[in-house]
Image: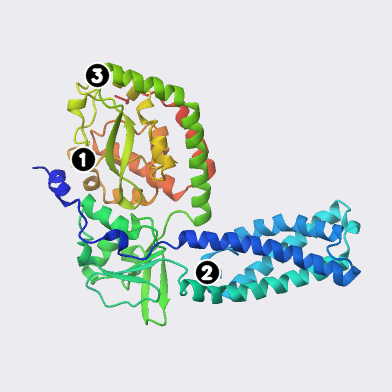
């Protein structure tokens, strides 16, 4: 019985993981931000309408309201970039008020600058606009003062998901946090068991902050593990240099200091941009390629009458399992669900039509469905089968940084693929080369780079290493 066969006996979680921690608050925060945007828009319009009434005796004088409507998109743009709408602002009203007023003043200055050079200042009443800006600033501050009160009343003060994992270290009663024992879920930081990593990944899903309290001898293992999970991870005390700490957090109420050892690679705004890009491209791809899908499905069925799709469990974001979908290219009786054997040239397992769709990368196209389901991205590190090996070693045995590539969603294509690092992994360098590209991509993500990689992928769909 090989290692993965033994591991497969461990598929059942030890505890009801899905109910072990509080439900995510991320969507709750997004709804709050959307409501804040609407209310801010209303306050701007009301402030300018009242300003024109106080100055000219005319409620909502048209030219004054035109100034408000011109100001609003500039205000929203600046506010979104200076974190006016952020989790910290839901807790700290003075911080939120400063950010909102700063965005208002900068947008007003820009509006006046543009109006000056377009010689349109005279079209606006300076008195009405000035009074309107003052009223808007006051209303924004008063509104921000009410937000923490509402958060405390309706959300019990919880604006973020926080998880404390106790693994033999001192107790850490973090306010508004869930606390679990590592032993209750058989979490072992020094283990390369993918099924244990999947359990941990499920526990850490949607977490904004994870704090681990563990003895000194296990802290380095936890630090490396948290770096692969795509979350903000902290460890209670330890020399910063050895753990590769990114910062220090002091919890004065708890009387404890922690070291920040990992952060999610993308912020909320970046994740929204990437998800929108993924959704648009996936929907467009499925529509445009639907005739090709139908043709490929028919050819696969005609060749041997077997299933059209091949579904294989792979590791995704946060080291959590998901089922990747491909067009079946191998004979039914020789399907390799674990990926124990790399595909080679003239492989006896591959059907005649399967060789064609593998050579042209058409077999990967059903993963657009994985993208729509939120399990994958258009661009990211390619997901690997559990049994994948290089030089007779599992990938994580070749390089300990391997798990870190899973802090982002896996991609349909990636930087490694457009650089030619694809195909069988016969040598250890076949893995380490693509791992270096994956980590480079994660460290320097941008939407522009995603678009560039997609365009480059079109040029390398057919390649000599595809067999």
Depth check: 378 or 34 in front?
A: 34
Q: Which label sits on residue 304?
A: 3
Which residue, given by chain and number where applicable, does mark 1 sit on? 387
Which badge, 3 or 1, comes first in the chain's sequence?
3
Secondary structure beneath dot 1 equals loop
Calculate the distance from the C-alpha at mark 3 to the C-alpha at mark 1. Answer: 27 Å
Q: Residue at x 38, y 23 (%)?
A: 360
Q: What's the mark number on residue 201?
A: none
Determine the image quadrant of residue 16.
bottom left
Instruction: Pinpoint residue 465: horizontal percent, then vertical percent.
Output: 32, 26
Residue contact at pointers 3 and 1, CB within 8 angstroms? no
What is the x, y in percent for residue 234? 36, 67
Q: Is residue 177 left or right of residue 352?
A: right
Return the residue at label 2: 88
Of 138 and 1, nearer the camera is: 138
> Mark 2 Cα within 10 Å, few/some/many (few <14, many 20+)?
some
Mark closest to the chain's N terminus, 2 or 1: 2
Residue depicted at x 72% and y 58%: 72
Residue 413 visible from this viewpoint: no
Kindly check if marks 2 and 3 are in contact, taking CB atoms under 8 A apart as contact. Answer: no
Q: Position of residue 381 (x, y in %)?
A: 37, 42
């Amino acid at each position: 019985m090989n290692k993965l066969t033994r591991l497969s006996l461990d598929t059942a979680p030890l505890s009801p993981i899905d109910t072990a921690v509080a439900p995510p608050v991320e969507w709750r925060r997004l709804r709050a931000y959307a409501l804040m945007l609407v209310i801010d828009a209303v306050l701007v319009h009301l402030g300018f309408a009242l300003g024109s009434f106080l100055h000219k005796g005319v409620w909502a004088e048209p030219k004054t309201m035109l100034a408000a409507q011109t100001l609003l998109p500039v205000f929203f743009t600046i506010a979104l970039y200076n974190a006016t709408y952020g989790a910290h602002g839901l807790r700290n009203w003075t911080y939120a008020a400063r950010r909102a007023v700063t965005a208002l003043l900068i947008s007003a200055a820009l509006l006046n600058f543009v109006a000056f050079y377009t010689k349109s200042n005279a079209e606006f009443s300076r008195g009405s606009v000035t009074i309107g800006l003052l009223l808007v600033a006051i209303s924004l501050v008063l509104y921000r003062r009410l937000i923490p009160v509402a958060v405390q009343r309706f959300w019990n003060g919880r604006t973020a998901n926080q998880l404390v994992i106790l693994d033999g270290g001192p107790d850490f009663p973090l306010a508004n946090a869930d606390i679990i024992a590592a032993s209750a879920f058989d979490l072992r930081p020094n283990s390369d068991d993918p099924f244990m990593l999947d359990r941990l990944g499920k526990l850490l899903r949607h977490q904004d902050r994870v704090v681990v309290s563990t003895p000194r001898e296990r802290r380095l293992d936890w630090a490396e593990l948290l770096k692969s999970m795509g979350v903000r991870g902290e460890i209670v005390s330890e020399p910063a240099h050895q753990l590769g700490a990114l910062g220090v957090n002091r919890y004065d109420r708890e009387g404890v200091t922690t070291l920040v050892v990992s952060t999610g690679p993308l912020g909320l705004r970046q994740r929204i941009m990437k998800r929108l890009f993924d959704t648009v491209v996936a929907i467009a791809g499925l529509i445009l390629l639907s005739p090709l899908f139908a043709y490929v499905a028919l050819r696969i069925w005609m060749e041997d009458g077997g299933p059209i799709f091949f579904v294989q469990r792979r590791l995704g974001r946060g080291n959590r399992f998901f089922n990747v979908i491909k067009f079946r290219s191998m004979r039914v009786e020789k399907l390799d669900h674990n990926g124990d054997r790399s595909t080679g040239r003239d492989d006896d397992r591959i059907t005649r039509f399967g060789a064609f769709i593998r050579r042209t990368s058409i077999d990967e196209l059903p993963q657009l469905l994985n993208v729509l389901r939120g399990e994958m991205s258009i661009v990211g590190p390619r997901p690997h089968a559990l049994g994948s090996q290089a030089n007779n070693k599992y990938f994580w045995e070749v390089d300990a940084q391997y798990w870190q590539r899973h802090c982002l969603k896996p991609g349909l294509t990636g930087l490694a693929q457009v650089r030619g690092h694809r195909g069988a992994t016969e040598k250890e360098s076949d893995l380490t080369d693509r791992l270096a590209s994956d980590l480079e991509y994660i460290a320097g993500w941008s939407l522009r780079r995603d678009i560039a990689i997609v365009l480059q992928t079109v040029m390398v769909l057919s390649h000599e290493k595809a067999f």
